Image: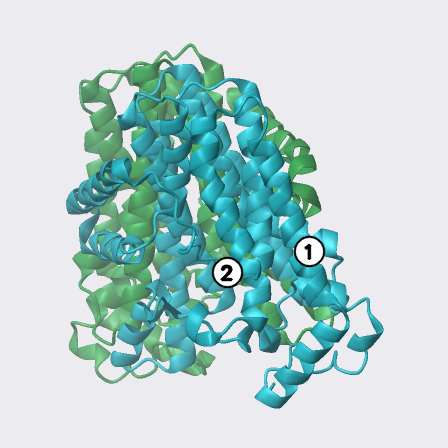
Chain colours: A green, B cyan
Amino acid sequence: MDPHDLVVVTGRRLQRVEEVLDGWFEVAAARGERFGSHHAHLIENLRRNTDGGKRFRPRMVLTAFETLGGTDLEVAARVAAAYELLHTALIVHDDVIDRDFVRRGRPNVSGSYRDRATTAGISLPLAEHRGMSVAVIAGDLALAGAYRLVDGCGADELTRGRLVELLDDAVSAAAAGEFADVDFSTHATMPSVDEVVEMERLKTAWYSFEAPLQAGAVVAGAGLATIDALGRFGRNIGIAYQIVDDVLGVFGEEDVTGKSSIGDLREGKRTVLIAYAATQPEWVDVHRLFGDPGLDTVGAARLRDALVTSGARDYAERLATDFANRAWEALAEDSVPASTRDELAPVVRAVLERTK
Amino acid sequence: MDPHDLVVVTGRRLQRVEEVLDGWFEVAAARGERFGSHHAHLIENLRRNTDGGKRFRPRMVLTAFETLGGTDLEVAARVAAAYELLHTALIVHDDVIDRDFVRRGRPNVSGSYRDRATTAGISLPLAEHRGMSVAVIAGDLALAGAYRLVDGCGADELTRGRLVELLDDAVSAAAAGEFADVDFSTHATMPSVDEVVEMERLKTAWYSFEAPLQAGAVVAGAGLATIDALGRFGRNIGIAYQIVDDVLGVFGEEDVTGKSSIGDLREGKRTVLIAYAATQPEWVDVHRLFGDPGLDTVGAARLRDALVTSGARDYAERLATDFANRAWEALAEDSVPASTRDELAPVVRAVLERTK
């Protein structure tokens, strides 16, 4: 997921997060003197892969923090930076799992090392494995960095304990969701819509929306009801976002989304769209095309037709709207101050507008 | 490295570490209710991969803790368990990097999932990739668990901060060492003996000997001179151990070491033995055999001959003895109490006896 089109108006304090991230990379690089040039190389590579992100998760932390009257920006900025490093760790490892060697049009960690290895005369399959190996290692460093930032965020003992717990839950959820995704694609039987929704919640919504919002609220000293409402908001809007993303992955205009609209069909990606279609008669004639590595544009068009005529596209769009509405409801609770609601409303609107 | 033959006499309190580990897995499994069955499966798999270990790193923590007069066993046991989980995380990811699907004669994380995937009808190469993907995810959970255990070890703020820093350094060192190892095998040029020694220190000695000993000393409230001496002891004995291990990997009796003595030669593993030999004229005639996947017993015997006649074997054994002697010297310092020295002396002797 790359929620670059969710514009949240916290901006002002984001600069401090950049400084914390810069500081983390500089300290890590300086420590490289004790760990040698290989450590420096890993840190540099991670930095390249963290730079230029939209800082979506830090924005979530800061939005909650700021609108709930938080005052200790230093703590919030470190926690926000931790979620950005966690995101780096997860995408670096996700790229290993998806065997992707490019991200945002540039070689990712695996890709840059693969290229280095082929230049050194290593055969491509081995070079790819070496690239993925280096990405496993680099992701570990970023994950450790996330824990380290929360550990050293400077909050009082009780707050820190809760922040570590939120981070830990986010890591456990992401691991469970990522594994569910791998597992679904391993088995021929199609998961149910509910199973896909749960997988997407665990894999992305939790660490991208739910946990960062709650962490920002915890730093601001918000009450339990508010933290709880923000968690529900994050979960539901995160799921809605992901369903829309999956629909766009198949029906989006390539020049708008920047992604191929055939890739997900070729890979056999299990989404709400497909899980629903698979229960409908229209799927019977085309299901063999789904997940076929040789799928061409004609076959893809047939699959898209079946997704429309089976009602899967409508179903997925309605489901996304349902989850977005649940997110509205969470925001509308008394425990959520108007300032928080005003800042988060554009997120819901952005998701709903994408469904059109 | 599997330092099962280093018997350290701390045993008594190791039971508490087992209980902490059991508790961690049980809490993690109970949390699985929130993260679903896929989380439970990962935790179960990690548990199987943690059970039955020799608990070498916990022993190091407890030896330092106990002989330096530590009193808070609860804190020490949690820190000890954290190093065991870190070890699990690193071997699970190391197996991905080495494409190993078996450990201690049983399918490891990658291996069990690979088998599940082939049973589901997935082709072997894809099933292997899926298995490795699941191992990447499981290793992340174990790594997070190590941080979580240190974070919640219950020590006072200052001690906890130092313990997190030791853990963090160990993770950075292991990442740097693992990457150096990958990088050495990618390039045709042979690393120098010093580079191999540094790689082995970073990859294994740091997190297995140096950091656990220092962490145990920190929990016991030892002074800086003692912590420093134990660090030097750990580093030097860890390197000595690793060099001996590499020699045994080529010259050991298979029925004693339990490992094939041809594997390292076939893989082209960069060790002190090879780094030295590569600078000697005897290597010229045989170097093409080294790293040849089709290496047979005749070729392996020729390589072993060259390693002996070039003086590489003698050199490596002398180097191991040198490092073991430096470890002795660190133990002999005034800041190290006799009780600590007495408990750690068998470790040095065990390493030296292995060289024979």
- Residue drawn at (73%, 82%) of the image: B288
The quarter of the displayed image where residue B104 is located: bottom left
Which is nearer the eye, A327 or A229? A229
Circle 2 is placed at which residue position?
A259
Q: Is residue B96 above or below residue B250?
A: above
Chain of the residue under the numbered disc 2 shown in the image: A
The quarter of the displayed image where residue B20 is located: top left
Mark 2, other Cα within 10 Å: few <14 / some 14–19 / many ≥20 = some
Cα gap from disc 2 to disc 1, whole angstroms? 59 Å
Which is nearer the eye, B64 or A215? B64
Q: Residue furthest right?
A: B281
User: Residue B318 — which label?
Assistant: 1
Which is nearer the eye, B171 or A325? B171
Q: Position of residue A73 (x, y in %)?
A: 47, 15
Residues marked 2 and 1, same chain: no
- Residue drawn at (23%, 78%) of the image: A283
Q: Secondary structure at mark 2?
A: loop
Q: Position of residue A261 (x, y in %)?
A: 45, 66
Q: Is residue A218 above or below residue A275?
A: above
Callout count: 2
Whether residue B311 can be seen here: yes
Q: Amino acid at mark 1?
A: Arg
Q: Is B192 left or right of B35, judged from the image as shown?
A: right
Q: Amino acid at mark 2?
A: Lys
Mark 1, other Cα within 10 Å: few <14 / some 14–19 / many ≥20 = some
Q: Position of residue B88 (x, y in %)?
A: 38, 51
Q: Secondary structure at mark 1?
A: helix
